[in-house]
Amino acid sequence: MGEEGEKELRLGVNIDHVATVRNARGSSYPDPVRAAKLAEEAGADGITAHLREDRRHISDRDIERLVEVLEVPLNFEMAPTEEMQAIALRHRPHAVCIVPERRQELTTEGGLDVKRDENRLAGFIAPLRDAGCRVSIFIAADRAQIDAAHKIGAAVIELHTGAYCDAFHEGRTQDAEEELGRLREMAAYAHGLGLEVHAGHGITYDTVQQIAAFPEIRELNIGHFLIGEAIFVGLAEAIGRMRALMDTAREG
């Protein structure tokens, strides 16, 4: 791949929390699919949606409509369950990102423990890969987890950036520097194995450039912050500013 391709950094916009607001009142609005189309028009390179077991935000119908109307790729986040596998195989989205999921968590709290569950996960992702989906595994920046993801045949890993972002915003400077260093080292390590490297969770305007500067990272997936910022400035402007910060970091 040429130098231009190596420098490309895609932005995936997660629209889950538009559905969270909708579901808070049990209404039909705001419509996450409308948000997805607005994000697409604003320059998002892909749309991410997490269909949870308890359907707390994105619904089955949302996924159906996203598949129907999106022109950019859909990244379907899902737990490694038979139900979610069947849904993914029915819709065959461009990408499937396997994430851990617990009913009581507010948001995804950490990466998937691939090493502990290698055999089952290898069998789980095989039909998804055979169906033409790009399979990604959401993991911590940990060498053993990266090795396991590579071993089971994942094409992509998404590094969990939440620990870094939390430390940064809480003013824990040393912890933030250590977490950023770990992300930098593991992004390079995964890239060296031939994995495509993505990153996401907790990223804001204040933390995006530090992560976007890593040349091995090809895609950032950002949702909660962008949807929150959109309340004040609109989704297109929020995405535009994030995109500009990413581009500046990658060009630097």
Image (cartoon, rainbow, N blue to C red):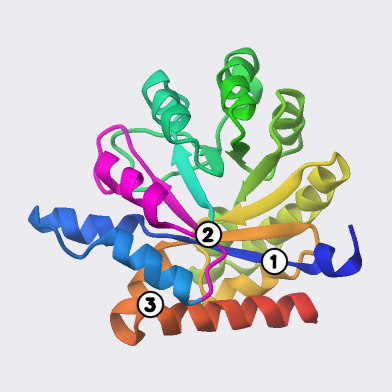
Q: Position of residue 135 (x, y in %)?
A: 61, 36
Secondary structure found at label 3: helix
Task: Give the residue at x 18% y 59%.
Answer: 22
Q: Which residues are magenta?
A: 43-71
List the residue tagged with mark 3. 235
Q: Which mark is residue 72?
A: 2
Crowding at dot 1, Cα within 10 Å, few <14 / some 14-19 / many 20+, comes out as many
Does label 3 or label 1 sit earlier along the sequence? 1
Q: Is residue 188 above or below residue 127?
A: below
Structural distance between the alpha carbons of marks 3 and 2: 17 Å
Asked whether, in this view, residue 113 is left or right of residue 66, the answer is right
List the residue tagged with mark 1. 9
Q: Is residue 241 above or below residue 123?
A: below
Quadrant the C terminus occupies: bottom right
Does label 2 or label 1 sit earlier along the sequence? 1
Task: Give the residue at x 31% y 84%.
Answer: 232
Q: Nearer the viewer, residue 76 or 163?
A: 76
Asked whether, in this view, residue 52 is left or right of residue 196, the answer is left
Structural distance between the alpha carbons of marks 3 and 1: 20 Å
